[in-house]
Image: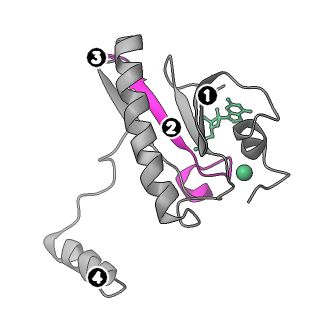
């Protein structure tokens, strides 16, 4: 399940060198070349999945456990006060490399990194109910 045109397949499987923080049978965790903060890492599965919707459940479960372990280690090593786990799916959501990956972003108190939520207009109670009903009818 590798895609020979995919740069993250090549990095995850060691064909392109990377600054690797962790590796096991299923994943490689590397430093991001365009980091949001010092120590910004990317968790890559070794198999190719374009995004969350292609990811199998077993790999999804393992991915969050590896991300958790990495954040714990990096917290101590880098003196991080907090972490963002960010995972973009589709160009609309800002995904630029179409091989599933999780950003593990160390944060410090008072750093000037902005990941803004809350700029969208506040929904009415009716709108919230309509959204909930729409999602639930597809579950
Ligand atoms: P996305 O926007 O798809 O969620 O994030 C892609 C991330 O991959 C970006 O943060 C970008 O800096 C990083 N990136 C792209 N190409 C490379 C590369 O060749 N090596 C590394 N280490 N990071 C990369
Ligand atoms: Zn790939």
Residue at mark 3: 109
- Report the disc number at residue 103: 2
Q: Nearer the viewer, mark 1 or mark 3?
A: 1
Mark with earlier residue (2, 4): 2
Q: Is residue 125 above or below residue 79?
A: below
- Alpha-carbon span between mark 1 and mark 3: 21 Å
Q: Which residues are magenta?
A: 90-111
Callout 1: CB less than 8 Å from ligand 1: yes
- Report the disc number at residue 91: none
Q: Residue 66 is drawn in which quadrant? A: top left
Q: Residues within 10 Å of mark 4 (few under 14, many from 20)?
A: few
Residue lying furthest right in this view?
4
- Report the disc number at residue 32: 1
Mark with earlier residue (1, 2): 1
The residue lying at 37 percent from left, 37 percent from top is: 68
Residue at mark 4: 136
- Alpha-carbon span between mark 2 and mark 4: 29 Å
The residue lying at 54 percent from left, 66 percent from top is: 53
């Amino acid at each position: 399940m590798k895609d020979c045109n995919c740069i993250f397949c090549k990095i995850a499987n060691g064909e392109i060198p990377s600054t690797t923080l962790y590796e096991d049978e299923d994943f490689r965790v590397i430093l991001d070349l365009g980091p949001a903060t010092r120590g910004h890492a990317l968790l890559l599965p070794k198999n190719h999945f374009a995004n969350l919707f292609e990811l199998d459940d077993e790999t999804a479960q393992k991915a969050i456990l590896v991300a958790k372990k990495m954040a714990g280690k990096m917290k101590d090593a880098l003196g991080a006060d907090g972490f963002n786990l960010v995972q973009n799916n589709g160009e609309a959501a800002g995904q630029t490399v179409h091989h599933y990956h999780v950003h593990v972003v160390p944060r410090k108190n008072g750093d000037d990194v902005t990941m803004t939520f809350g700029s969208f207009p506040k929904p009415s109670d009716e709108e919230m109910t309509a959204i909930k009903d729409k999602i639930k009818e597809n579950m």
